[in-house]
Image (spheres, rainbow, N blue to C red):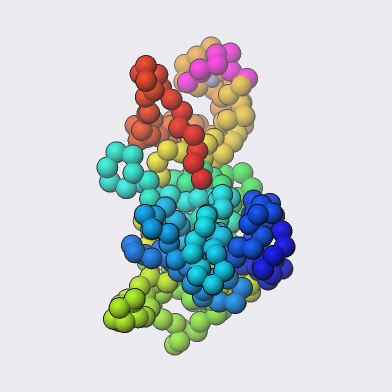
Amino acid sequence: MTGLNDIAALSRLGFGAYFTQQVTADEADLLVRRISSVHRDRLEAIDNTGPVAIELPPNSNTADFAVGDWVLAAPYTGLLVRRLDRQTVLQRRTEGAFGQQLAAANVDTLFIVTSCNADFNPARLERYLIMANEAGTRPVIVLTKADTVDDATPFADEAKALQRDLPVVIVNARSPDAIDPLMPWCGPGQTVALVGSSGVGKSTLVNTLAGHSEETAQKTGAIREHDAKGRHTTTARSLHAIASGGWVIDTPGIRTLYVSDITDGIDTLFAEITELAPHCKFRDCSHSHEKGCAVQAAIKEGTLDAERLERWRQLQAENRDRTPVYTGPKGNKTLRKKKY
Ligand SMILES: Nc1nc2c(ncn2[C@@H]2O[C@H](COP(=O)(O)OP(=O)(O)OP(=O)(O)O)[C@@H](O)[C@H]2O)c(=O)[nH]1
Ligand SMILES: [Zn+2]
C-alpha cells in the first residue's frame, strides 16, 4: 500500500500487516485513521499527526464502530469510506435478547486488574480470562496494591494456576515503576485495555502508564471539551497514548464487560481438559460417570485437579443458559458466524 499514508508512522499507532493487506490498490488514495472515541452522534479519530476529522456518511450508525477500529477516509473531507476488518473485538452483552454492544476493537492485550485483597476472586478472574480468550486478545493478570501486603506471591501463584502460560504481574499502580513489568505489552504500536472491578486501580494504572503524575492526573475518563454547537460538555476520552509508545483503551463500556457466549474462551481456559476430551471413549462424554473417560482417569492419576473440572462444569452450564440459540428456517439450530 502506498498513497498518502505514512505507513511507518501509522505502525506506531498499531497499523500492522493484518490491516495493510486489506487496503486495495483502488483505495491507495484514502487516508488511514483510528477511531479514538465513539459518541452517540459522531466519531473521533486520530492518525500519526494527532486528532483528525472523521465524518460519518448519512444513515450510518456510530454504534457500528468501536474505539480502536481502523477506517479509511476521504482526503480533505474526512468522510468515512469503510472500516477495516477487526483483528480482535471486545463486546458486551446488553439487556435484551441478542444485543451485543461493541466495547473496543483491535486490542492486543487485556490487562485483567485485581488487587491483593478481598477483590481477589479466582472465579471472577476466570470469567475475565474467558472473555479475553473469546475476543482474541492476550490476557495478562495485573495484581495491584502489592504495597499493602507483606507478600503478594500467594496471590500471584493462585492466578498463574488459572490458565496455562498466563502472565501475572505484581505492581503498586501508584508508583511510576509500575510500567516496568508491563512494558512487554506497552511498546510502540501495541494496544492494551483494562478490565476489573471498581476500585482495583484501573484509573490509577492508566494515569501511571500515560506518565501523568498524581498531581497532574485528570480524573480519567472525563475531559471537558466543546461539542459541535460550542457548548461545554464532558465526554469520555478513550484512547490514551502510553509513555512507552503503546496505547491504552479505557471506555465505560469496557468497565462493565461481562461474560456470555464464550465456548472458545472456555476451551482455552481449561486447555488441559479440552485436550483430554478426544481421548474419552464417547464423543459427547460429560466427564462425570462415563466408562473410559480420560478426564476422570486424569483426576484419579492426580494429573488433573477435581476442582478445575467442577469449575469447567459450572461455566459450561452457565454458557449454555446464556448463549442465545439461533434457529434456522426449519427450526434447526444454526451456529452464528463470528462477526468481527
Ligand atoms: N496502595 C495502593 N493504592 C492503590 C493502588 N492502585 C490503586 N490504588 C488506590 O485505590 C483507589 C481506587 O483506584 P482507582 O484507580 O480509582 O480504581 P478503578 O479501578 O479505576 O475504579 P473505578 O473507576 O471505580 O472502576 C485509589 O484511591 C487509588 O489511589 C496500589 O497499587 N496501591
Ligand atoms: Zn470424558
Please indicate, yes or no, whether residue 310 appears anywhere in the rendered image. no
**Residue 280 counted in the magenta span:** yes
Q: Residue at x 33, y 77 (%)?
A: 227
Figure quadrant, ligand 2 = top right
Query: Against 254, is 279 above or below?
Result: above
Please indicate, yes or no, whether residue 42 appears anywhere in the rendered image. yes
**Residue 204 counted in the magenta span:** no
Query: Against 101, is 249 above or below?
Result: below
Left or right placement of residue 313 versus residue 242 in this view: left
- Name the spot of residue 315 as percent of width and height, x first: 42, 36
- Name the spot of residue 320 as percent of width and height, x first: 38, 30
Check the picture and name the quadrant holding the N terminus: bottom right
Q: Residue at x 63, y 20 (%)?
A: 279
Task: Depth check: give the residue in front, 215 or 261.
Answer: 261
Query: Against 293, is 306 above or below?
Result: below
Q: Magenta span covers which residues?
A: 279-286
- Name the spot of residue 132 as percent of width and height, x first: 51, 49
Left or right placement of residue 110 versus residue 10 in this view: left
